[in-house]
Image (cartoon, helix red, strand yellow):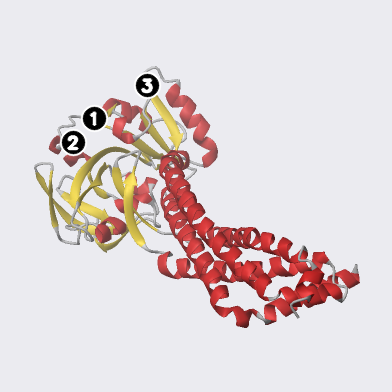
């Protein structure tokens, strides 16, 4: 066994030391693999960034109440009497006698993007004062909170960066009303940063919503009180509602786009990988052909087929791994944290998010490079092992 391993290390070392003699073909393989990995990681970082933005929004001790049968706030509707009953349900956190709950409206306004000037859907959310208790991660970092009963709004940091007209002290016209931006807020990078917030009582008449809302957000005493809160509401004959954890609600909204981007990214990378594999095959076949006499000499000296096969595969894996590392590194430097916006298919509104090149994606890219190296190196390795010794030695 030791003798066999020593042959493997000896032949592999010889192969790697002669890489400089095949610099052109080797670099072609490295950069071919690097391109595949860079594209794969970059595309998947879009899906990962979107999902991170959506899931960061969720808190296990926050519940969302919608009308029964509704999948999103856009299709929900609740009357004020309903929201009052919900706010008095057991399990809600309270500051004195004030429940940490907010009945809210959700409408869409059209604003131009800063990058292209094209109009896109931006969420305008009407909230009640309890919203700041429910979403305690929200912090106004520029300006101030809006005053109740006025046409003032505060804007999420991501929305202000992505869309025109949402700068501090700017005025936005929508829904036959003018809205004055008095603050910019952050929310730990969650989806809330893609929204514009105003007073729900002011938003209702502007969009002719009467005395209705679309959802109630409630901060619970603890995650464990969710079932008690849910059971109390669903058993109340005055209500016809569904109750979901905020974490589950936003995770479900991210699934469609995540699946689409991941699927397309994998297909694109797969097609590119075919080209990279052919490049690796060409490189390794050329290497075997150029060293046929050397391989035959080793075989004549007693080297077995196994070490020859492993040495050629090892060379292919080294080239592919180098390409994978380069591609993953380029994707990280170019795309990690890159700001973008895309359509949330559940609410048909824009969500601003940042690409996320995570360690998991980097490892996934390296695994892809290893697979390409293995597929590209195995057939030439088998050919090298089967090379007739007598035929090759005649060329000496």
Q: Quadrant of the N terminus?
A: bottom right
Mark 3–mark 2 distance (CA, rounded to whole Å):
22 Å
Compare marks 3 and 1 and give the one earlier in the sequence.
Answer: 1
Q: Residues within 10 Å of mark 2 (few under 14, many from 20)?
A: some
Residue at the (45%, 34%) spot, across then down: 244
Labels 3 and 1 touching (C-beta < 8 A) = no
Q: Position of residue 250 (x, y in %)?
A: 42, 42
Q: In front here: 301 or 54?
A: 301
Is 205 located above or below residue 37 in the figure?
above
Residue that sits furthest to the front in the current view: 394
Residue 240: mark: 3
Q: Judge from the rendering whether residue 151 lies leftward or rightward of residue 247; answer left or right.
A: left
Horizontal and vertical percent for residue 257? 41, 44
In the shown orientation, is residue 321 left or right of residue 140? right
> Of the numbered discs in the image, which one, if any, rests on residue 204?
2
Give the Cα distance between marks 3 and 1.
15 Å
């Amino acid at each position: 066994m030791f003798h066999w391993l020593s042959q493997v290390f000896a032949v592999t070392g010889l192969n790697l030391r002669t890489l400089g003699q095949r610099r052109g073909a080797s670099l072609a393989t490295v950069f071919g693999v690097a391109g595949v990995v860079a594209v794969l990681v970059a595309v998947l970082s879009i899906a990962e960034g979107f999902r991170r933005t959506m899931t960061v929004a969720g808190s296990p001790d926050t519940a969302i109440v919608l009308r029964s049968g509704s999948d999103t706030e856009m299709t929900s509707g609740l009357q004020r009497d309903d929201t009052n009953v919900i706010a008095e349900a057991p399990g809600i956190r309270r500051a004195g006698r004030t429940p940490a709950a907010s009945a809210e409206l959700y409408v869409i306004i059209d604003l131009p993007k800063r990058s292209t000037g094209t109009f896109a859907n931006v969420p305008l959310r009407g909230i009640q004062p309890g919203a700041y208790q429910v979403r305690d991660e929200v912090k106004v970092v520029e300006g101030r909170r809006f005053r109740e009963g006025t046409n003032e709004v505060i804007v999420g940091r991501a929305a202000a960066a992505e869309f025109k007209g949402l700068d501090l002290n700017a005025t936005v016209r929508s829904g036959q009303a003018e809205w004055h931006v008095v603050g910019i807020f952050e929310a730990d990078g969650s989806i809330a940063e893609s929204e514009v917030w105003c007073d729900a009582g002011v938003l209702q008449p502007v969009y002719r919503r009467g005395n209705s809302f679309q959802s109630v957000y409630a901060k619970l005493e603890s995650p464990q009180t969710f079932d008690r809160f849910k059971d109390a509401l669903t058993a109340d004959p005055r209500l016809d509602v569904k109750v979901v954890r905020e974490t589950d609600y936003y995770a479900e909204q991210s699934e469609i786009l995540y699946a689409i981007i991941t699927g397309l990214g994998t297909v694109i990378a797969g097609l590119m990988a075919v080209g990279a594999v052919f490049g690796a095959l060409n490189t390794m076949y050329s290497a075997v052909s150029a060293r046929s006499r050397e391989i035959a000499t080793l075989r004549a000296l007693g080297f077995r087929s196994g070490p020859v096969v492993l040495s050629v595969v090892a060379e292919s894996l080294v080239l592919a791994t180098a390409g994978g590392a380069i591609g993953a590194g380029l994707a990280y430097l170019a795309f990690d944290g890159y700001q973008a916006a895309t359509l949330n298919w559940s609410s048909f509104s824009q969500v601003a998010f940042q690409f996320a090149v995570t360690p998991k994606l980097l490892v996934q890219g390296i695994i892809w490079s290893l697979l390409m190296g293995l597929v590209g190196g195995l057939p030439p390795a088998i050919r090298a092992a089967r090379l007739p010794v007598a035929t090759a030695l005649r060329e000496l």
